[in-house]
Amino acid sequence: MKVPLFDMTRQYEKIRTEVLNTIDEIFKSGKVVLGKHVKNLEENIEKYMNVKNAIGVANGSDALVIAVKALNLNPGDYVITTPYTFFATASCIVRNGLTPIFVDIEEKYYNIDLNEVERILKTHPQKEKIKAIIPVHLFGKTVDMKKLLELKEKYNLKVIEDTAQAIGAVWYDGDKKIYAGTASEFGTISFFPTKNLGGYGDGGMIVSNNDELSQKAKYLRVHGASKKYYHDEVGFNSRLDEVQAAILDIKLKQLDEYIEKRINVAKIYKKLFTENGLNEYIEYPEVFKDRTHVYHQYVITLKSGNRDELFKHLKENEIGTSIYYPKGLHLQKCFEDLGYKEGDFPITEKACKTTIALPIFPELTEKEQEHVVKTIKNYFKGE
């Protein structure tokens, strides 16, 4: 049986007619950039996430770059982030003339270790120049936002939540439900096709409850122009197009259903791993009572065995898999000048060697999951 890591075609079949009719209407209108569909999506994201401002941009990477620029930090200021994430989380710092400080991750969910963050804030030789932090809600699991906001207040930090993988994830402050990306200066979202809310091309969003920062982000996306042909500063050309916005708006209505189905996939994996006696070989993400994980990726960690051999075994059996991420950002060639070396972040480096992503998407069937787990069992037990 062939099982893809991700399959957008099954989802498309259910919304195909509505999508095609909407695209036809857009093309007939002749308005294809920053029109009514972008405005509708922005307003509906604001309602969905209970946030004051949503600004559509061309992609998730641009969302990060624009959000960092809007903070108006000074060249040479430091921004803390994680080395275990997609490249854009760190490149947005450098592209704005700032310097990243990498901090290692937690053992279990691989989010940034906030205890290590506080240690850096206390001991860094130029701690007064640390102005911001970009945490990542990795694979869909929220960072410990209560602790992060305590650090934000204590050390006067600006915070940009990289929510590229976690739209729809929530955390709780008492009885108050708070969406990932909405409790700090900015949250940034990616609508890359594989995301929980994915377009049929690229797209991104910046969300914020700060009206002044939001206004700045809004004009930065159109070359820094507060009105057409009047440029307050050098900005970017990063506009969300009408086609992607319309498709995303259609899918937004189904997002909670998509997430609940992903959570159910995670529950089934847990059941199958236990039934097949694999708990001694692998560690997998738990399923929470409340939605603090939306399973953009389903990443397991090998306790024994060779991750690369398992990767090969799954590929040979036509099971989609991937490695997020094979090399920490602190060891990437483009960041050599930061002076990090192998061994600096042991948990990140271990994760790069022991983690592997399994198929997950809302339409994945239990039969397909059974085949995935039996194939993993075959690798460990030869059965």
Image (spheres, rainbow, N blue to C red):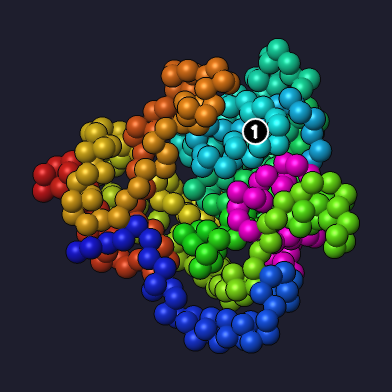
Left or right placement of residue 296 versus residue 134 in this view: left
The quadrant in which the N terminus is found is bottom left
Is residue 63 among the parts visible in the rendering? yes
* Residue in the image at 47% along x and 82% along y: 16
Left or right placement of residue 235 versus residue 192 in this view: right
Is residue 174 among the parts visible in the rendering? no
Residue 72: % across, % down: 81, 38
* Residue in the image at 67% along x and 24% along y: 118
Query: Residue 307 lies in what quarter of the image?
Result: top left
Looking at the image, residue 280 lies above or below residue 25: above
Please tell me whether residue 65 belongs to the stretch shown in magenta. Answer: yes
Outermost left residue: 383
- Amino acid on which the number 1 mark rests in the picture: Val
Bounds of the magenta span? Answer: 41-70
Count of numbered circles in the view:
1
Query: What is the secondary structure assignment of the residue under circle 1?
Result: helix
Please tell me whether residue 15 belongs to the stretch shown in magenta. Answer: no
Residue 372: % across, % down: 25, 56
Can you identify the residue that label 1 sits on? Answer: 94
**Viewer-closest of 56 and 261:** 56
Residue 50: % across, % down: 74, 62
* Residue in the image at 15% along x and 47% along y: 378
Residue 197: % across, % down: 55, 64
Left or right placement of residue 52 versus residue 241 in this view: right
Prevailing secondary structure of the magenta residues: helix
